[in-house]
Image (cartoon, helix red, strand yellow):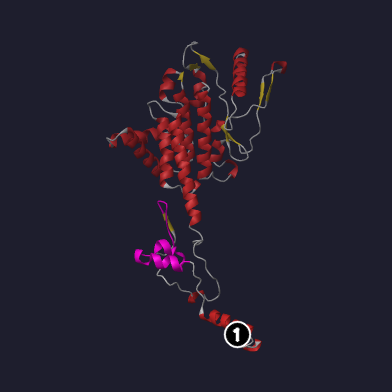
Amino acid sequence: TSPSSTQRFFHTEVQICFRCCHINILQLLGFSVETGLHCLIYPYLPNGSLQNKLQCHDDSSPLTWDMRISISIGVIRAVEYLHNFGILHGNIKSSNVLLDENFTPKLGHSGLRLHSAEKKSEYAMMKTKVLQASLTYLPEDFIRHGKLTEKVDIFSCGVVLAEALSGMKALDEGRHPIYLKDMIADEIQTAKESSHSKVKGLEKLAAKAICCKYLDKKAGHLPEEAAVDFASAICLCLRKKSSNIAEVLEFMEMAENKLREHYMCGSSTSGFSMNTPEETDDETANLSMDVPSAVGTKEEISCGTLQRSPWRSNLATAAPPQNRALARETSWKIQINDQKKKLMENILLYEEDKLNSSELFES
């Protein structure tokens, strides 16, 4: 690297870092130019790179789905922020996404030497020699023409998202095809050939196929709707026509919301309805309700509808229509077993001096 190109890159990096202030962009702490040595100082991020975490380096635990989706959204927001400033990153990849102590993603700056082809040009030309390290994340049209545009960044972002969804390496020479981007492209092409529907239908079809084949099982269970939205965001990034980063972000946020709803519904399935007070004692077998309960064996969540188990049903909603009025009257009643009822009667007699203490506890 020539001194002039190093200095130019250094100045560009410093300008970008001081212009940009975003939670998902790596912060520049300082720099040094003493003795001709150019040095950029960044904070230490304890969780390393997204690439290493996805591959479970150092025997680290697999990233959960909520972490993967949150990280992906952070990367997309960082790219959107840069593009709003007219800045093209040019080197988005999982090794360049760093994670802080809370697993908040920080997109590192490019490290590539970008040169304006002409002052009025809307793109930059990249030297061919730097392609070797980043070919994995670049679209074919960029490889052919070397034109760096917003679409290139969005495409690269899609490959990072594909890594997060699948847990696979972006480049694996022991796999065919070796590039993850080509595996996703094959699924999109297959969906296109097997369907005559509109573009959105094609992407959803491809997204379902991607989920069926490549969803990372190490991360646990991911609800189908959230998985399809995640994969749809990837398809949007990798499609050949113009990509929209805002649309990609929208799909990822939908995936996040559906996963959150899944967790919330899951938490509500444990425990009983707070509308039905219960008395607990050692003779619960004798407890009974005045109104028949709904049929079922356990609580289930389906499309936002909560179905409670028979022994903990909300009678005001679970009972048949003809019993709902009665249900509202009885749902708050506390059923008392016969022995306890007898004891309470004896206590009243004892308080009226009609029963002595020995007789009270003998009964």
Whole-percent x and y of residue 335?
Answer: 50, 73
Q: Nearer the viewer, residue 298 or 6?
A: 298
Q: Residue at x 55, y 73 (%)?
A: 281
Residue 193 position (above or below residue 130):
below
In the displayed orientation, state which residue is furthest to the front: 352
Q: Which amino acid does label 1 sit on?
A: Leu
Q: Label 1 neighbourhood size at 10 Å, few (<14), some (14-19), many (20+)?
A: some
Q: Which residue is drawn at 49% across and 16% down?
A: 124
Tell me the quarter of the image containing the N terminus.
top right
Q: What residue sits right under mark 1 in the picture?
A: 349
In the displayed orientation, state which residue is furthest to the left: 196
Q: Which residue is drawn at 52% across and 68% down?
A: 278
Whole-percent x and y of residue 102?
Answer: 61, 41
Q: Which residue is drawn at 52% across and 66% down?
A: 277
Residue 223 among magenta residues: no
Residue 315 among magenta residues: yes
Whole-percent x and y of residue 319?
Answer: 39, 65
Give residue 213's quadrant in the image: top left
Is residue 322 rendered to the left or right of residue 247? left
Tell me the quarter of the image containing the C terminus.
bottom right
Give residue 295's quadrant in the image: bottom left
Give residue 243's quadrant in the image: top left
- Give, as a single range, the part of the protein colored magenta: 302-331
